[in-house]
Amino acid sequence: MPAALTDAIRVLAKKQNAVILAHTYQPAQIQDIADYVGDSYGLSVEATNVTADVIIFCGVMFMAETAAILNPAKRVIIPEPTAGCPMAEMITADELVEVKRQHPDHIVICYVNSTADIKALSDICCTSSNALKIVRQIPREQGIIFVPDKHLGGYVKEQAGRDMILWDGFCPTHVRITPDMIASARALHPGATVLIHPEAPKASRDLADHVFSTGGMCDYVKKDTAREYIIATETGIIHTLEKQNPEKRFFPASDQALCPNMKKMTLEKVLAALEGNAGMVVTVPEDIAEKARKSLTRMMEMSR
């Protein structure tokens, strides 16, 4: 990293009492400048523990919105406002209202990869690391609507043995990970353990050794005795894994597993956001934030 640029970021962040949060899918330089790097759940928890006045959020918009909802007294800034999430945009509030009207006796569990409007209409939020744990706590007689990711929802359905209504949403990055890619990666690295994200389609998940969230992958690798891993999720996590486990080797299942929105962030944009010359202060209308906060709070209560 250019020393002058990173030094300037650190000086300004300290001066403004700002903390930099970054997702594991962010570019390596962004991860290296961040005060905390984690998955969606880890970032949600960390956001509630922040004592700084300003949160510079290096991720996509729904993540920055979540931080703003959980920290109404903090100033949350996303350096790249165009970093959206296609999955989050695959369901609208009106569409969810209609599904709820058709199934009035069902509760709604929404994946954190959703807009504030969807969180506000949901009973419980979840991430890929805690979705299964949360669903297993719901009485079996209680109907569940799961939005917006059909692949994560399908995985939870299989593991929990529950009949859930799934929305037809998906992550464009994870659906690029095909069974052929898994097979090719195994052929190149026959002794490697395959770890895959539950946002990947079932046909690909079935070929992996383990299914984990990004945080789950990091936790597993730290404790596992294997030396080589094929990683079937967005490739940004490999930088995280290599930093945490320098003695181990990691191979992407596919170089095509890149999230273009996650890769929009640059050090220059982070500096410009701290200088007030770029980025956007993320705000959520209080009526929506209050309702969304309830679904997020319930998620954290059910994840303990």
Image (cartoon, rainbow, N blue to C red):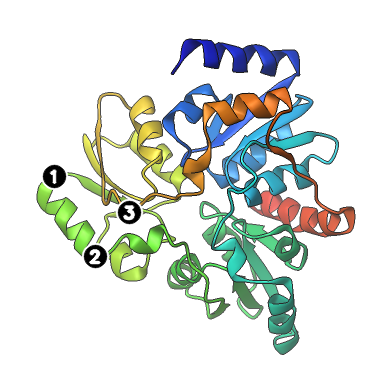
The answer for how far apart the CA atoms under marks 3 and 1 are is 15 Å
When asked about the image quadrant of residue 179, the answer is bottom left
Q: Is residue 215 above or below residue 197?
A: above
- Give the class, few, some or many, for how many residues have Cα within 10 Å of label 2's Cα (few <14, many ≥20): some
What residue is shown with label 2?
A: 179
Of labels 2 and 3, the one closer to you: 2
Mark toward the start of the polypeptide (2 vs 3): 2
Q: Residue at x 71, y 89 (%)?
A: 102
Q: Please, what secondary structure does the residue beneath circle 1 have?
A: loop
The answer for how far apart the CA atoms under marks 2 and 3 are is 15 Å
Mark toward the start of the polypeptide (3 vs 1): 1
> Which one is nearer the viewer's eye here, 138 or 210?
210
Mark toward the start of the polypeptide (2 vs 1): 2
**Amino acid type indicated by mark 2:** Pro
Mark yes or no: residue 50 visible. Answer: no
Give x and y (percent) for residue 145. 63, 76
Q: Residue at x 43, y 18 (%)?
A: 1
Q: Please, what secondary structure does the residue beneath circle 2 have?
A: helix
What residue is shown with label 1?
A: 191
Give x and y (percent) for residue 114. 63, 60
Q: Residue at x 75, y 51 (%)?
A: 297
Mark yes or no: residue 48 visible. Answer: yes
Of labels 2 and 1, the one closer to you: 2
Determine the residue located farthest toward the right in the rendered image: 287
**Amino acid type indicated by mark 3:** His
What residue is shown with label 3?
A: 210
- Give the class, few, some or many, for how many residues have Cα within 10 Å of label 1's Cα (few <14, many ≥20): few
Q: Is residue 66 above or below residue 53?
A: below
